[in-house]
Amino acid sequence: MASPDIGNGLLSTAPRPRRLARWRNNLVIVVLVSLLVLDHYFPQYFHPEHGYFPSTHSSLEESVVVIDIQDPVHEQPAVNQTTWNDKFTDMMAEHQWAYDNETMIAEFAQFADRVKVLMQSQSLLEEFHESQARAGSEDVALTEKAREMQEEQDELFAKLFPYVSKSKKARRTLAELQKGFTHPKGIVIPCGNDQFQMAIHIISTLKHVHKTPLPIHVVYASPGDLDIPKRAAFRSISPDVEAVDILHFFDEEEVGLENGGWAIKVFAILSAPFKEVIILDADAIFLQKPEVLFEFPGYKETGTLYFRDREIFPGEGDVHRWWKRQMEGRTPSEEMMKSKFWLTAGSREEMESGVVVYDKTRRDVLMGIIMTGWMNTRSVRDQVTYKVTHGDKESFWMAFELIGAPYAFSSVEYAAMIGQLTHPDKSAHS
């Protein structure tokens, strides 16, 4: 005899089959719905391919996952199309201004303002590509806009710095210039026939006394600038010493390096395959390994290292007055605020360019070198730079100052000359 139902069967020890099936079906539905909800909001526990599982070796603090229901952790923020469209449109307007705004050759500051537009454009494109990488997806429309902006950027670069190209018909973009920087570090020494003896001395010292592992390029301009036997002599010192003719790397009509004298130095820096480069005058003397220059704090911070010249001819002169005009409306950099040249006109010459160090992988540094190159092109140096300053040396720091790129002078500020005074007018020397 079956046990009686009590209270409509709620306490029955043998539930009816139909009710049991209905109860089981409802439970399955509840479980499935729960799993779907959990899968939507907590995918890290259901999809290992997302890579969100905490490490089994992580601490409790490291394994805590903060979840925003409105923004699931597996979704990266999308690129804001409206914002980037506005940025690109504004930047393209700046491009047009910089392209059309022709400047007088003597107005270095105005020219530098156009270069700053180019630098801002480079930063914007870099920021955009980084934002797309973070989003993990590509916005086709914005990518096309960025491509158009890159083309405009290349056009502006060619307009401002035509000398960088090999010729009028063979244009070289900034990216193509950078592709040539294939070696980590090296030394560049400009040298002609007249500097041969001094160059042999310093290279022999660097290789055989200090035993530097850095490759060395001896740079000359035209076959007649450095005779074939002299080139062979340099190569005989060490297998990693090369003699390089720079004459046709740039547009010779623009740079005028054949018989160009001091001007060769900045172009030797730019054309060198070294990402980090030390340029030396042939008459420099090293008492320790040149690699120590890469360890200077100022170099590590800015990617540049300059040395101050001796103090000579104090008192305000034409160069100081010209420089003040270029700096009108500009805020002097922290480095320039340490300068006697700027603060008190304590010397006519600020920098000694016998040793200069650069990290060309840094965008601001490379643009500063390219600006320095412009200041040393044939027409600019003949009409302005070498008239208001003594040769190339002030152009190195002035270019960086004008475009707002950080630079550093050595904090060890000793400069001197070794030798015998032979000039009849001793008052003309310090």
Image (cartoon, rainbow, N blue to C red):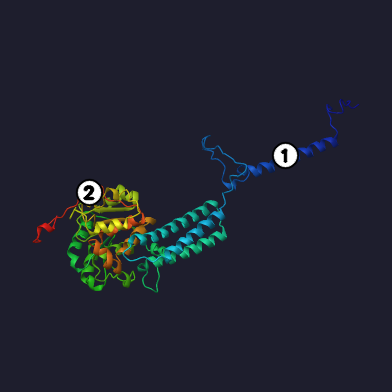
Residue drawn 54% across the image and 54% down it: 83
Could one spot residue 406 in this view of the protein? yes
Q: Position of residue 177 (x, y in %)?
A: 38, 64
Q: How many marks?
A: 2
Q: Nearer the viewer, residue 35 or 84?
A: 84
Q: Is any part of residue 214 visible from this angle?
A: no
**Whole-percent x and y of residue 22?**
82, 38
Give residue 15's position: percent from left, percent from top. 84, 31
Disc 1 on helix, strand or loop? helix
> As drawn, which residue projects farthest toward the right?
1
Q: Residues within 10 Å of mark 2 (few under 14, many from 20)?
A: few
Residue at 17% in and 53% down:
416
Q: Which label belongs to residue 31?
A: 1
Q: Which residue is mark 2?
A: 413
Res 216 quadrant in image:
bottom left
Q: Amino acid at mark 2?
A: Glu
